[in-house]
Amino acid sequence: MHPGSGDYEPGGRSPLFYYPVLLSVSAMIDSTKIENLVNEFISGTDIFLVEVKVSRENKITVYADTLKGIKLEQCADLSRYIEQNLSRDIEDYELEVSSPGIGKPFKVKEQYIKNIGNVVEVLRKSGEKFRGVLKDVKDSGFGISQTSVKKVKSAAGVTESNDLYFNFDDIKSVKEILIFK
């Protein structure tokens, strides 16, 4: 075989070409489609949507809750509703429906309302951290009450309370903190 002659000899050397082969073609599921299904299901109920995540591998994660805490049956019903409205023949996916869980940053205003009276950790965009009891929630932000004990020479300690208010725009994250006594 002469280079560049165009002649082909069986067993001879030929240039290496790369042809990627897709074994399975499955479109990525649009998270908006899942959000719409969830919103259809929860309409008129006490359930609120916290977040929908869809990975490139079509792992769908739906976080939902209620002000009193979502029940397992509610998660199962929501999961069945989503599955009934998706076709595994068209879209291969994995589905998980649950509450967001303790220690996860708040995503929606309802989570703040649910946690009034609980201890939260606030992280400002500036990097400042605060810890206190969530007192109230408004459209623009929320308030916490920090309590500290200061030692005094003549007494065991004096409790001081400091109320702080935060605008949602200034916050990087807020999450519930469990304190074990």
Image (tube, rainbow, N blue to C red):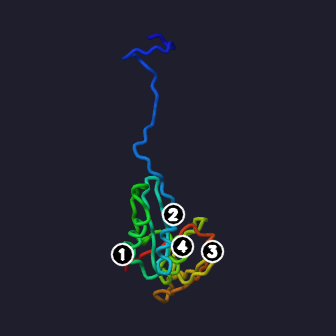
Q: Amino acid at mark 3?
A: Asn
Which one is in front in this view, the residue at disc 3 or the one at disc 2? Answer: 2
Reply above or below: 107 against 54. below
Q: Are marks 1 and 4 in contact (CB under 8 Å)?
A: no
Marker disc for residue 33: 2
Q: As rendered, which of 123 and 111 lies closer to the eye?
A: 111
Q: Mark 3 and mark 1: span between their CA atoms?
A: 33 Å
Residue 154 in picture, x, y percent from top left: 49, 89
Q: As rendered, which of 161 and 95 lies closer to the eye?
A: 95
Q: Mark 2 and mark 1: span between their CA atoms?
A: 23 Å
State the SS at label 3.
Answer: strand
Sort mark 2 into few (<14), some (14-19) or many (20+) by Cα contacts within 10 Å. Answer: few
Residue 97 in picture, x, y percent from top left: 40, 68
Q: Amino acid at mark 1?
A: Leu
Q: Mark 4 and mark 2: span between their CA atoms?
A: 19 Å
Sort mark 3 into few (<14), some (14-19) or many (20+) by Cα contacts within 10 Å. Answer: few
The residue lying furthest to the bottom in this view is 154
Q: As rendered, which of 9 and 157 lies closer to the eye?
A: 9
Badge 4 is on which residue? Answer: 108
Badge 1 is on which residue? Answer: 72
